[in-house]
Image (cartoon, rainbow, N blue to C red):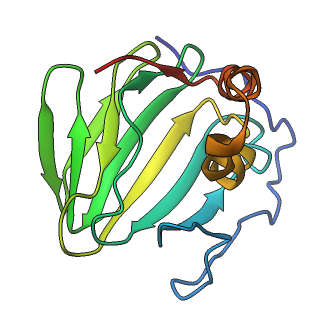
Amino acid sequence: MSYPDPVYKDGQGVVSATYRPAGAAAELAAPNGNRTHYLAKGTATNGAFGLYRVDMAPRAGGPATHFHRAISESFFILGGTVRIYDGERWIDATEGDFVHVPQGGLHGFRNDADADASMLLLFAPGAPREEYFEKVAEAVHWSEEERAEFFIKHDTYWVAD
């Protein structure tokens, strides 16, 4: 494996960093009490990755077993306990734990604890996950056909537990 071809080709460098203070408000507050911070959307990283902080409310649950065909998903636990399904078993991941799920890997995650939990989610490449986060809670009100179309559009394939 080698480095990818250069994207930036000028020799001088540019001022282009993005700063987000720790106290910045979440872009999304979900009905279950979760908050999602859009740290680095795929549009900001030229599609290289998407990075999100998810603050989960106590007993907020989470998505059942699923996989993605085009994107990998990685989890880094910042605090609390997040139950993560690795395709074989549910793991109680705690502060500092990391789980990487390549494309096609079965996974799920949830907060079943009586306390808050927080994690970083990294998607690579940087797919436009924001619409998924913003609309997924509405899917229960849609027809089966509308739900199927939405999940396929957002590279999410559910597997019966």
Q: Is residue 57 left or right of residue 25?
A: left
Q: How many marks?
A: 0
Image spot of residue 127 (x, y percent):
69, 34
Snapshot quadrant of residue 52: bottom right
User: Who is closer to the viewer here, 3 or 144?
Assistant: 144
Q: Is residue 136 left or right of residue 109?
A: right
Q: Is residue 126 left or right of residue 65?
A: right
User: Who is closer to the viewer here, 53 or 96?
Assistant: 53
Q: In the rendered image of this protein, does residue 157 appear above or below residue 37?
A: above
Image spot of residue 61 (x, y percent):
34, 54
Q: Residue at x 44, y 12 (%)?
A: 104
Q: Residue at x 63, y 21 (%)?
A: 4
Q: In the rendered image of this protein, does residue 33 appear above or below residue 93?
A: below
Residue lying furthest right: 10
Quarter of the image for the C terminus: give it.
Answer: top left
Snapshot quadrant of residue 118: bottom left
Q: In the rendered image of this protein, does residue 156 appear above or below residue 110?
A: above
Q: In the rendered image of this protein, does residue 28 appear above or below residue 157?
A: below
Image spot of residue 69 (x, y percent):
55, 13
Image spot of residue 43 (x, y percent):
80, 45
Snapshot quadrant of residue 151: top right
Q: Residue at x 20, y 58 (%)?
A: 96
User: Who is closer to the viewer here, 98 or 157?
Assistant: 157
